Amino acid sequence: MWKTSDLKKKARGSMKHNMKRMISVCFLIAMLTTAYTSSTFFIHHYNSNGYDLSFSELTGNAPTSQIIEDTLEQLMNKRIPVFHSVIGFFSTLLIDLYISGRSIIFSIIKAIHTLLFRKFEWASAFVLAGVLLAILYQYLIANILFIGEKRFFLEAKNYHSTKISKIFYLFKLRFTKNPVWIMFCRSVYQALWNLTIIGGFIKHYEYSMIPYILAENPAIDRSEAFHLSKQLMKGNKLHLFRMHLSFLHWKILSFFTLGLVNLIFTNPYITATDTELYLVLRKKYVRSRLPGYEQFNDPIIDVVPSEDELLISKALYDDSEGPYCKISYFAPDQYPVFLYSIQPPKSEIHSVWNKNRVYDFPTCVFIFFTFSIFGWLFETCMFLTREGVFSNRGLLIGPWIPLYGFCGLLILKFVQRISHLPILSFLSIMTIYSVVEYFFDWIMKGNHKLININYHGYFMTLNRHTFLGGSIFFALVGCAFLYYLAPKCADYFLSLSKKWKYIILSTLSILFITDLIFTLFF
């Protein structure tokens, strides 16, 4: 029988080699999914106390607890005293810490709130469409990233140079349909069992190994995945509960630091410990040759092959003419991807990113306009689906937000050269955006014709011109721009003929300058 102390010791050993990467991965998962909700509390928290909020402001910015409180009071048609007491203060804090505003449960509550707060109209339809998109995002993207996180921790155990980008590995393999289906079934079964309360608690631990099983073998059959998770957890569910309970003191400490301790230590610690448990249970199951053991088809996830074994395997692989057959060098201390059971298409082998790439002036102009338009579309669609009201999110009349384009050019100029260091690149992009947004809003503050941004009520603002959550969110978008969008955009522009390049740049430049002059002076 495994011991919690042994698993924790192994987890701490793994964290010594991968601490920065593990924190980064858990942070990304917290920002991109509904996991680790308490870790992002201090980033996205919004305090609306003392302000008269309209419906759009309430649904768009208010904390999760306020939406729940308002919905319950609307349903009961009276004021609920407990929400306005000392107990209510701590309960709302717990709700905001541990219930994500992006979760499916909250999305349903928000939909009910929408229907109660006003009559059904087009604005309500857009809000409900936003709820539907949130549900689709959870099943089609967030669950895949969650599996990718498990894959990262599995590889990082023995391959200490595992890249942060491993969380996107299923997208790179273009193999998402089966994992999406299995994770969807897991969520549905879990929701049904939750109705029995005790059964929901038991099934939560019985299904806990499914993400790890999918991380090892994404092609596994649905029934096999559930069967193996059940067999692995047979006799271990209560022990796993006790193991999670042993982290309670870290959770309490994190509560008093508004999730900061979870972000920098507890989240990677718990996940690394869970990973150690999976590897222990998996090894025991395979050695016992129990039914379905052959589905654990990635032996080198637990045993690192020798250099001679890798050379022989690569020689045999080259005969198969796989996508990696023309690549002779693989980075040391990383998982040999050519031995994985599922191979990516050849188009996904080479990254579009190159830190030494040089963008000429016409390409930079095209990227400026493209990213400015992308920013307008992105913010407008988010505002429309979140609040149900169409609003021009840009300062100009046209469909562009120059702040995005300007920051994009600064990223290519100053961050491109350090892009091989993803954590430093992220922090640099966050700093660039904060500085640019602050001065951009400060300069435009005196012009009453333009929309002035006011981040009143958000946590950690700088004179209400910029705030931490917005800077972090833009840094995530900026990293996507740096590593993928900008190279793809440049490749497309360079593939055009000179005639079309001239037409596109001239048209966009004339429209932009005209818009700028009209907005500022008329």
Image (tube, rainbow, N blue to C red):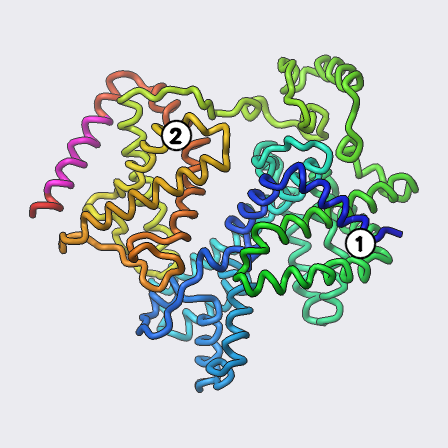
Extreme left residue here? Answer: 522
| Mark 1 neighbour class, 10 Å CA radius: few under 14, some 14 to 19, many 20 or more | some
Which amino acid lies under the numbered mark 2 shown in the image of this protein?
Ala
Q: Residue at x 44, y 86 (%)?
A: 78
Find residue 479 and report its image quarter.
top left
Q: Residue at x 50, y 34 (%)?
A: 422
Give how far across and how far down residue 293 sits, in percent: 85, 40
Which amino acid lies under the numbered mark 1 shown in the image of this protein?
Thr
Range of the magenta residues? 504-517
| Mark 2 neighbour class, 10 Å CA radius: few under 14, some 14 to 19, many 20 or more | many
Magenta segment main secondary structure = helix
- Quick check: is 118 in the magenta stretch? no
* Residue receiving disc 1: 4
Q: Which is more toward the observer, 288 or 445?
A: 445
Comes first in the chain, label 1 or label 2: 1
The kind of secondary structure element at disc 1 is helix
Q: Give the label on residue 486, or none.
A: 2
Is residue 262 shown to the viewer in this render? Answer: yes
Give how far across and how far down residue 254 sits, in percent: 58, 60
The kind of secondary structure element at disc 2 is helix
Q: Give the label on residue 128, or none.
A: none
